[in-house]
Image (cartoon, rainbow, N blue to C red):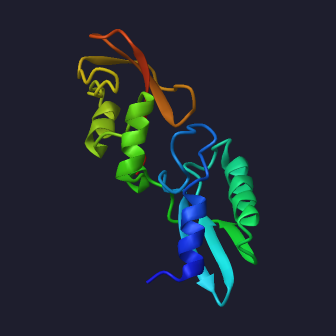
């Protein structure tokens, strides 16, 4: 059962946008790992999507700013690297927001594993729903995304790579 402080903090943090994908919050993305009321001190653990993510410091600063603005004092924000972040941590609402924004959400883990064996990834176009897509580049607008194009609607799109 969440304390009132924890509930308030989750609500505040759910409004903190990811700096690279502003339609999804750091909570929906699974970056906020835990929020714990430790005798009145709020302890927030965050995990970057990957160790080299250039937005890690911006996200931490945004979390601190949101907690300060909401006057949820005192608090501690800690970056934890283990266990590592996984695309499994993206909420269903987050996946839907990615799709609506034009980014294909992470597919089943087997899709990316099969790509390691030289097979084409079958990624559904977030614009028209076609499965007739082709990877253009392993790296899209950010390192955690690959760039695809749809052969049916001809629209380019990013695919949020599956990380496990």
Residue 74 occupies which quadrant of the picture? bottom right
Residue 11 in view here: yes
Question: Residue furthest toward the bottom?
Answer: 39
Left or right: 135 in relation to 143: left
- In depth, the one of 117 and 20 nearer the eye is 20
Q: Residue at horizontal 33%, vertical 17%?
A: 134
- In depth, the one of 89 and 15 nearer the eye is 15
- The quadrant the N terminus occupies is bottom left
Q: Residue at horizontal 25%, vertical 24%?
A: 129
Q: Residue at horizontal 31%, vertical 11%?
A: 153
**In the rendering, at what x and y percent does residue 79 appear?**
65, 63
**In the rendering, at what x and y percent does residue 138 appear?**
47, 25
Residue 81 in view here: no
Left or right: 48 in relation to 98: right
Q: Residue at horizontal 42%, vertical 40%?
A: 97
Q: How many marks?
A: 0
On screen, residue 124 above or below 156: below
On screen, residue 66 above or below 53: below
**In the rendering, at what x and y percent does residue 57 appear?**
73, 50
On screen, residue 142 above or below 58: above
On screen, residue 104 above or below 17: above
- In depth, the one of 103 and 83 nearer the eye is 103
């Amino acid at each position: 059962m969440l304390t009132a402080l924890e509930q308030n903090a989750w609500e505040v943090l759910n409004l903190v946008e990811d700096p690279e994908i502003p339609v999804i919050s750091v909570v929906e993305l699974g970056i906020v790992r835990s929020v714990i009321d430790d005798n009145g001190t709020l302890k927030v653990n965050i995990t970057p999507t990957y160790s080299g993510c250039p937005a890690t410091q911006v996200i931490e600063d945004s979390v601190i700013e949101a907690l300060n603005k909401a006057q949820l004092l005192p608090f501690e924000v800690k970056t934890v690297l283990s266990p590592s972040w996984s695309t499994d941590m993206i909420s269903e609402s987050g996946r839907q927001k990615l799709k609506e924004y034009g980014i294909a959400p992470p597919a089943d883990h087997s899709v990316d594993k099969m790509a390691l064996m030289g097979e084409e990834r079958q990624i559904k176009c977030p614009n028209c729903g076609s499965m007739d897509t082709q990877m253009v580049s392993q790296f899209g607008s950010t390192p955690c995304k690959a760039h695809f194009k749809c052969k049916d609607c001809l629209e380019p799109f990013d695919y949020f790579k599956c990380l496990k």
